[in-house]
Structure formats: structure tokens, C-alpha cells
Image (tube, helix red, strand yellow):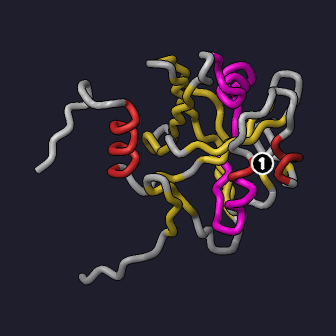
Amino acid sequence: MLSFHTDSIPEDLCYKLLTSLVAPRPIAWVSSISPEGVRNLAPFSFFNVVCDSPPLVFLSISKRDDGRRKDTAENIIRVGEFVINFVSEELIKEVELTSGDFPPEVDEFDIAGLTPMNSELVKVPSVKEARAWMECTLFRHEELFGYDLILGRVVNIRLRDQDLKPIGRLSGRFCKVFEINQGS
């Protein structure tokens, strides 16, 4: 049996162990806007549901190498709203395009050739090509160990009529979701 004391192993090994064991991790494709109205879109795999009453989700957003806050976190903190767009396998190329480190004035919707769609309860646009959306307001923000931890209150959930076909992260690879037929 192997044992890894997290205080005494390299950070990259700790990361690999955590992301390999807590899997698959769903991907939150987060749209936000700056106070000036510039659209932002970026994927995050440190994301999950916290509770259902009230409906809360969390995002963990690392800081840039120079210690500055990433645009998504800055926008959520300053504007107080964001949308989680659920990605499907046919959008993986666009997700990858939006994962780059762009200057704040760059619109990632344009970079990826995506269509912004009005949301119902928040002013942040949704990705029209996605299959499901959670419109969120900022519930709480904490800075912890170089990360911006965002708790979002889900105020609206929208679904397309077709199958979701969600994707997630499985260590360094992407994975497909399938059903297991369980006996009674």
C-alpha cells in the first residue's frame, strides 16, 4: 500500500493524486462580464455542487503566476453574477480555445466563435451552443492559499430538450459519461 503525506510531497504530485482520485470532475465553462461590459469565458474543473437548499455551487480559481487575480474571478467579485455553461463533447475545441490566458479586454466568445445568449435572471450572457446553464449570483468569496474560492447561488437552471452529453476531467484526460445498469 502506498501512502502520501501531503505536507511532504511535491505540489505537482499532490495535484496529480487529487485530480486522479476525485474523478471525473465536471467542467464549469464560466461566462462573466467585467464592470465595463467585456465578456469573458473560461473553463474550470475545480467545480462542484455544495448543497441544494439553498442551491450553491463552488469554483476554485487559481491566481496567475504573478499573483494577480484571473479575469473570471475579478469579474464575479466585482459584478456579482456569472453563468455556468455545461459543455458537451462537440464543444471541446471551443472549450480549449477559451482556456488561454488572454488580456482582460479580449472577448473569449469572439475568440472561440461562440454566440452570446441573453440569460433570464442575470445580466451575464450564456453560451447559446451549450446544452444547459446555471445562472448564479455571488454568495461568498474567500481568498485561500492563492486561490479565489467562489460560492455561487444558483438562481436559474435552463436545459435544452436534447441529451446533455456532459464531459468532465479525468486526471489529465477528458472522459465520457455513461450509465451503468444496476441490478435491483
Magenta stretch holds residue 93:
yes
x 86%, y 38%: residue: 107
**Most foreground residue, 68 or 12:** 12
Tell me: 135 left or right of 13.
right
- Name the residue: 65% across, 17% down: 68
Residue 34: % across, % down? 81, 26
Q: Which residue is mark 1?
A: 126
Q: For the residue carrying disc 1, how many other residues have a C-alpha within 10 Å: few (<14), some (14-19), or many (20+)?
A: many
Q: Is residue 145 visible?
A: yes
Left or right: where 110 falls relative to 72? right
Residues drawn in magenta: 68-95
Instruction: Find out whether residue 74 is within the magenta segment.
Output: yes
User: Residue 141 location, x and y as percent?
Assistant: 55, 21
| Amino acid type at image mark 1 | Ser
Residue 41 placement (x, y as % from top left):
74, 41
- The answer to which of 126 and 54 lies nearer the viewer is 126
Specify the quadrant of the image occupied by residue 160: bottom right
